[in-house]
Image (cartoon, rainbow, N blue to C red):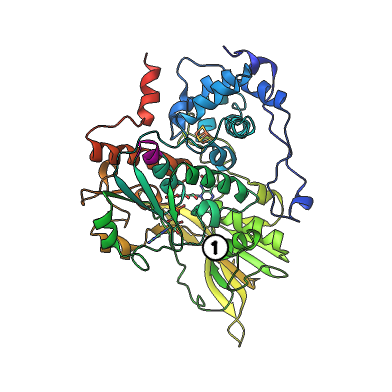
Amino acid sequence: MGQHDGFLKYDRELPSERPPKDRVGDFKEIYEPFPEDKTKTQASRCMDCGVPFCHSGCPLGNIIPEFNAAVHDEDWKEAVSILYSTNNFPEFTGRICPAPCEASCVLGINKPPVAIEHIEKTIAEKAHELGYITAHPPKQRTGKKIAVIGSGPAGLAAADQLNKAGHWVTVFERESKVGGLLRYGIPDFKLEKWVVDRRIQIMDDEGVHFKVNAEVGKSINPEMLKDEFDSIVVCTGSTVPRNLPIPGRDLKGIHFAMDFLTLQNKEVDGEQIEKKLTAKGKNVVVLGGGDTGSDCIGTSHRQGAASVVQLELMPKPQAKRGESDPWPMWPMTLRTSSSHEEGGERQWSILTKEFIGNESGELTHVKLVDIEWVNQGGRQQMKEIEGTERLIPCELALLAVGFTQPESPLLDHLGVTKTNSGTVSAKDYQTNVESIFAAGDARRGQSLVVWAISEGREAARQVDRYLMGSTELPSKNDSFLSLEV
Ligand SMILES: Cc1cc2nc3c(=O)[nH]c(=O)nc-3n(C[C@H](O)[C@H](O)[C@H](O)COP(=O)(O)OP(=O)(O)OC[C@H]3O[C@@H](n4cnc5c(N)ncnc54)[C@H](O)[C@@H]3O)c2cc1C
Ligand code: SF4
């Protein structure tokens, strides 16, 4: 039923964040508790539009107006059942999704959109609190065996779906713990790892077999997988970091963002770490203005950096949507993350020219110059602005300029072809090798958790169809189709 005039009565409200000066003292999630009544009020802001654009904004096709109505009616069982019908892991997306659904929410045309992501997190946590999310192993097994390589959100979603379909699934993960970037990339202040552990435990109880410290192509022979399993799903992520090969790159103190973030996540988790890399007392320069860069900022502040500067090559984004990104498209506007609120300086239209070091080979400064973007023959070209070259102090530089592709050796071993950009070529998730499928960042390139889950689900469908001749696993298109009824 719901209530559809809440948007006339109530403003958008989200849980408060702990004050920045307090939260930089730990790695815990930044939000304060939020009363259930307030979430119910937020759900009532949903207008239950005739054409809910939020459905198509969400890569999973989450059925948002329906779960909002159930939350408003305090029918948690119904809300949980609607949400989990399209999303295996709303406890992850409810915390760390950039919420493209909210960008396409119809209310967002002239008012702040419905707080969809927060409502999703509340439903997911309520589901656990009320005991709705417990292990439900499949009643029947098909006898088919599937190897999933990589335990990030794509691998986990594929494994979960294929296990639900009754297949025996083994997930091979080269790290010592399961979760991919959920565990080793995304900092705890965005996603505490007990949330990942809780999910893995349920999957384990349901019969998914996890093999850690198992790198396919090194400790695990890919030929063995081909022989012993009926199908393989490659979910190895897009893990090759983009480098910045400028003079001075070899100096001590320049690291890829993931090396820095992974060590911190391991330390928070109590894992044994082989080396220590800390921002404590250092002037930190983060190269790259995206989410990974922002995670480096939050982590540097928590480690006690002396200063943090984030440099971005592109111009400062606009504050509001423009002609090129009207509603309901994803807005290319300035984003300020919780890590930015905690301090540091952001600079745009900056070209990093050189890393400068001392006689011991240690980084001491970064040389940079302001640039302007000029239109030349219809293409934007960068032009250095004369007289702006300068040095800024820096003892730790973190390269957060993206990831180029998945690692090639395993793909070559398996004999799967790649696209021109180096990702796995897998139309409808199936590679050129009939029994091998691919999903997540390895297939679509560096992306988002919500896309990885979506890809894992869709790939599982294709694997099930390949093995059984037909499939009853749902597709995101099912929820779009139901709109037409
Ligand atoms: C620092 C950082 C922060 C991010 N923050 C967000 C965010 O806030 N919100 C969001 O939506 N997205 C975020 N992303 C993006 C998101 O994490 C990824 O898009 C998503 O995790 C991709 O999932 P995946 O399963 O395809 O790959 P991954 O999560 O990369 O998992 C791949 C797994 O495969 C394993 N593997 C690789 N090769 C082998 C092998 N040969 N044998 C065995 N195992 C192997 C890896 O160890 C890894 O565990 C972030 C990314 C980074 C780097
Ligand atoms: S998964 Fe992301 S895009 Fe989909 S409904 Fe949740 S917050 Fe929105």
Q: Residue at x 45, y 18 (%)?
A: 51
Q: What is the secondary structure assignment of the residue under circle 1? A: helix
Q: Main secondary structure of the magenta part?
A: helix
The boundaries of the magenta stretch are 161-166
Residue type at mark 1 is: Ala
Image coordinates for residue 158, horizontal then vertical, percent: 39, 43
Asked if residue 347 is positioned above or below residue 62 in the image, the reply reads: below
Image coordinates for residue 147, horizontal then vertical, percent: 34, 51
Q: Is mark 1 within 8 Å of ligand 1?
A: yes
Let me know if residue 355 appears in the view. Answer: yes
Left or right of 426 on screen, residue 138: right
Q: Which residue is mark 1?
A: 257
> Which is nearer the eye, 461 or 137?
137
Asked if residue 464 is positioned above or below residue 27 in the image, the reply reads: above
Asked if residue 211 is positioned above or below residue 78 in the image, the reply reads: below
Tag 1: Cα neighbours inside 10 Å, few (<14), some, or many (≥20)? Answer: many
